[in-house]
Amino acid sequence: MEQPRFYRHGHGSDEEHKKDQALFSQLLAQHHEIVRETVFIKNGIKAKTTTQNPDLVSILQAHVQGMEKRFENGRAIRSWDPLFAALFEYRDEIHMKYYPIQNGIEAILTSDNPAIIEIIHCHDKTLHSFIEEGSKAGKRQSPKPDWLE
């Protein structure tokens, strides 16, 4: 598989990026109130991300809506991170479904391409680290498949 292009779209100075960044920052700040459970399926993952804090549920759901919109429009985030660059590069091969649930979000991410399933699994590990460690994890590169080296 060829190396992905790295998306370098400035530093996110537009209003939409600022809004998305503010939601993400709040989730990182309150990471200890969030739970993520992942089930690995044949072609990807099913995950539930929840919280008992009603305000945080709204933030989580708004964050996912914003990220879904960015993904659909190819408006990359964390373009300095090879995993996120690959997510946006190969977004046409990733099938995502998000469902708001009572205390958060249920997500199903799949692909027909085994290499892209590796990207999905690495992204899931990254989200778990954000929840476990908060902003400490947000400052480092995500794990990535060996072929992205």
Image: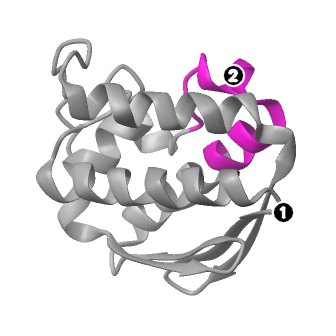
Q: Is residue 81 above or below residue 143?
A: above
Residue 63's disc is none
Q: Which amino acid does label 2 sit on?
A: Ser
- Residue 8 in which image quadrant: top left
Q: Quadrant of the C terminus?
A: top left
Q: Mark 2 points at which residue?
A: 135
Q: In this view, does 39 lie above or below 68?
A: below
Q: Give the range drawn in magenta.
A: 126-143
- Residue 148 in which image quadrant: top left
Whether residue 22 appears in magenta in the rendering, the answer is no
Tell me which residue sits at (52%, 40%) in the image: 144
Judged left or right of residue 70, residue 141 is right
SS for dot 1: loop
**Which is more toward the observer, 2 or 56?**
56
**Which is more toward the observer, 142 or 37?**
37
Residue 140, percent across and down? 60, 19
Q: In this view, does 126 lie above or below 5?
A: below
Tell me which residue sits at (69%, 22%) in the image: 135
Residue 52's disc is 1
